[in-house]
Amino acid sequence: MPERPIALVTGASRGIGAAVARELSNTHDLLLGGRDTDALQTLANELPGHAEPWAVELTDHDAVAEKVAGIDRLDALVHSAGLVEIGPVSDMTGDAWRRTFELNLFAVTELTRLALPALRAASGHVVLVNSGAGLAAKPNWGTYAASKFALRAFADVLRAEESANGVRVTSVFPGRTATDMQRELRAQEGGTYEPEQYLQPESVARPVVSAVQATPDAHLTEIILRPS
Ligand SMILES: NC(=O)c1ccc[n+]([C@@H]2O[C@H](COP(=O)([O-])OP(=O)(O)OC[C@H]3O[C@@H](n4cnc5c(N)ncnc54)[C@H](OP(=O)(O)O)[C@@H]3O)[C@@H](O)[C@H]2O)c1
């Protein structure tokens, strides 16, 4: 039997990351990133093929380096872990800016850097789950939008630098999606959570997997999704 390709998905314990892991499990062996080891093990047990928890606090760069050390080939790295805090600039403290950037940007840049040798070895694919807020910045979305604008810039630079090494890079910009993050966000906004009005996590996962599985001549660089 030929070896199956290997994918590492962050934020795989819930939401969009879990849906991406489910969708990728048809073709890939999986490392399931997250912190909730019970949720990761439950998902691993459900999936066909090989899947194992890859539990690590992504903002702890030393811990991430230790986890990456054992990976010598990586066909896909999907960055889904992220957080959102909303509020006007007048209320956003330095700590709030740092919390958001630590996870939404610095955790992504460091994990990508550490994984690059393994990605190059496999002519792999990096997918960055961005957001509509990474394309248009609105009032109250300062920290989150800024982190996602920066994430897009990082993706563009990475693509330009690494395409010669056979590494493809895709930014995905979903609108509101029915996950725990959206439930918490609606509570912060003082609105009701209406999952039927939003994208389903599976609907975001599908195009992510299409990008990863695109033929080598095709590079899906950016995917924008809105609830219809
Ligand atoms: N939901 C939306 O409406 C929406 C829209 C556009 C873009 N997005 C983006 O989509 C991505 C996924 O969002 P989601 O809605 O699926 O979020 P979610 O349901 O809140 O899940 C967040 C995931 O990130 C992981 N995570 C959080 N902090 C972490 C940390 N410090 N270290 C390691 N893992 C951590 C969580 O793991 P544990 O639970 O195991 O800690 C969980 O698996 C995010 O980048 C988000 O910005 C979401």
Image: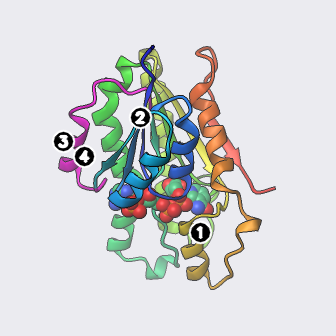
Disc 3 residue type (three-letter): Glu
In space, the residues marked 3 and 2 are separated at their CA atoms by 21 Å
Tell me which corner region of the image, top left, top right, bottom left or bottom right, holds residue 35.
Answer: bottom left
* Mark closer to the chain start, 2 or 4: 2
Residue interval drawn in magenta:
57-76
In space, the residues marked 2 and 1 are separated at their CA atoms by 30 Å
Q: Is residue 150 left or right of residue 202?
A: left
- Count all numbered tags in the image, as a single digit: 4
Q: Are marks 2 and 4 in contact (CB under 8 Å)?
A: no
Query: Element under label 3?
Result: helix
Q: Are marks 3 and 4 in contact (CB under 8 Å)?
A: yes
* Mark closer to the chain start, 1 or 4: 4
Disc 2 residue type (three-letter): His
Q: Which residue is mark 2?
A: 50
Query: Element under label 1?
Result: helix
Q: Is residue 103 visible?
A: no
Its colouring scheme is rainbow
Disc 4 residue type (three-letter): Val
In space, the residues marked 3 and 1 are separated at their CA atoms by 32 Å
As drawn, the label of residue 64 is 4
Q: Is residue 210 left or right of residue 26?
A: right
Density class for disc 4 (Cα within 10 Å; few <14, some 14-19, many ≥20) is: some
* Mark closer to the chain start, 3 or 1: 3
Picture layout, residue 82 above or below residue 127: below
